[in-house]
Image (spheres, grey):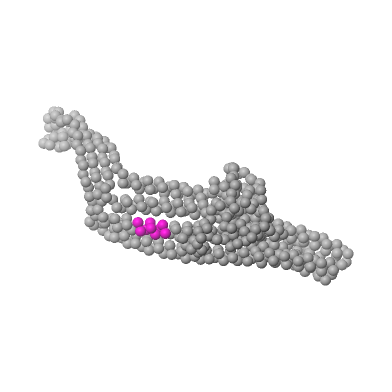
Amino acid sequence: MNRKLSRLILSLIAAGSFSTHAASNHSTDTIISTTDLENLYNLAIQNDPLLRTAELTQQKSSFAIDGAKGQLLPQINAYFNLSAFVDSDSVESTYGGNGAIGNVGITLSQSIYTPAVQAGISIAGKDNESAELLVTKAHEALIYRTTKSYFDVLRNQALLDTAKANEEALAQYLSITQHRNKAGISSEIDLLQAQARKDQSEVAVLEAEVQYQLALDSLQTLSGQEFQAVQPLKTDSYTAHFPNSASGMSWLDASMSNNRDIQLAGVAVERTKIELSRAKAGHKPTISLQARLNQRFLGDIESTASGNSIDNNESLTSGDLALVMNVPIYSGSSLTAFVDIANSDVDIAYQILEQSRRETHQNIRFALRLVESSIKKVDAFQRNVNSQEKALISVQKGYELGARNMSEVLDSTRDYYLSESQLYNAYFTYIESALLVKFIAGEISDQDIRSLNASIKK
């Protein structure tokens, strides 16, 4: 058992810095033998569907802003029509006539005062702000997911190694017991107990191997690549400290200020307020400038009564320019209902914001307690490993002298390897909980990947 490992991991997170090494892009069916944390993160950045979805959503929301602003720009349209008349008074008012008339022209409409459109632009801006926050959250979540998945592999690798070491030790005890039984200095019960524990250890190894493979499979979900192993940690000595917020605030204050869920809920409140303004704008007038330029063409026309051609004037060019104001007077109860709905949405958004604050408060306190507990557990389990190691040596010597039985040896062996497993689990729980604190507080970053990767064996 390398006791330097605990000090290494604890200090890395306590220092508040964790990070990565560039990776080449591989096809999704390639199996890479091994990876370090930074390489895994780089692959995840390139291939993670959740992050890519958030980025595409933000891109779409930016297009929506352009679409909303376009309603304030001049709207220019061209038109053409050709009409044929049969016995129409539009040609000859007394008896009617036959002929054709064509029009070609261009229209222009320019909004001058349209409060609903202005509110729509602001809403599109808030949607884009939310989308940007979601990209940031997806990126930060990817950092946390990557490190958690990586250290889950290391945790399961440690458990597998411990299970194999336990199996090997029990195999040796079984062999010794078999020889002692043949020599008549060990009972049949001791032999059966040793065999049973050996069989149990084989099952434990099989279960640990399955969990290890499942942990490796989770890396494929992140990166699109398959791996056979990950690089282990260095075993240099470090000192553990409780992590501090980079903002200088307490973790609770930092979380209340920078948590992405709270920020998203805050943007949602602002958006519903703008929606309320847009609903109220339905009661306001709108002003626009309308212009039209028309060119009329007369075809051959004739009187229905005489069949004679009717003289037509030169083609007529006309133009219109108008300032149009529309004032809503009565539209049933729809506008009032829309305002009431928008008011309700504002109240709902405030409740969601309050719920986000309460959940964040609970989550950060839970994560901080988990960090504190993990530090204490690492220290306690380290002492426990030392004690169990000494106890195992003592029981082994007692068994050799006949003062201890095989059951006690097997129990002591089991307890020793269990204490190692608990220590490894405490190490990686500390890593995850410290990163969780930073994630909740909105302070997790690529630097965490780089600093953690510095502890990876190359």
The residue that appears at 50% across and 48% down in the rendered structure is: 52
Judge whether residue 270 is colored magenta.
Answer: yes
Residue 41 in the image: above or below residue 105 = below
Quadrant for residue 279, please give it. Answer: bottom left
Find residue 360 and report its horizontal and vertical position in percent: 49, 63
Residue at the outermost front position = 248
Q: Is residue 324 visible?
A: yes
In reply to whether residue 112 is colored magenta, the answer given is: no
Picture residue at 41% right of the left edge, 57% below the top = 267
Quarter where residue 79 is shown: top left
Within the image, what quadrant is residue 405 found in?
bottom right
Q: Kindly identify the residue that appears in the image at 52 percent across and 57 percent down.
A: 443
Residue placed farthest to the left in the image? 94
Q: Position of residue 165 (x, y in %)?
A: 74, 58
Residue 371 is situated, as x and y percent measured from the top left of the image, at 58, 63
Foreground of the two, 445 or 425: 445
Name the foreground residue: 280 vs 378: 378
**Magenta region's main secondary structure?**
helix
Provide residue 40's location: percent of width, then percent of height.
59, 49
Residue nearest the observer in this picture, 341 or 26: 26
Region rendered in magenta = 266-275
Confirm whether residue 84 shows in the render.
Answer: no
Q: Which image quadrant: the N terminus?
A: bottom right
Q: How many labels does the image show?
A: 0
* In the displayed structure image, the side of residue 78 where residue 86 appears, left or right: left
Relative to 95, 195 lies left or right = right
Residue beneath the point at 73% across and 57% down: 164
Say which of 350 and 377 sits in front. Answer: 377
Residue at the far bottom: name it. Answer: 403
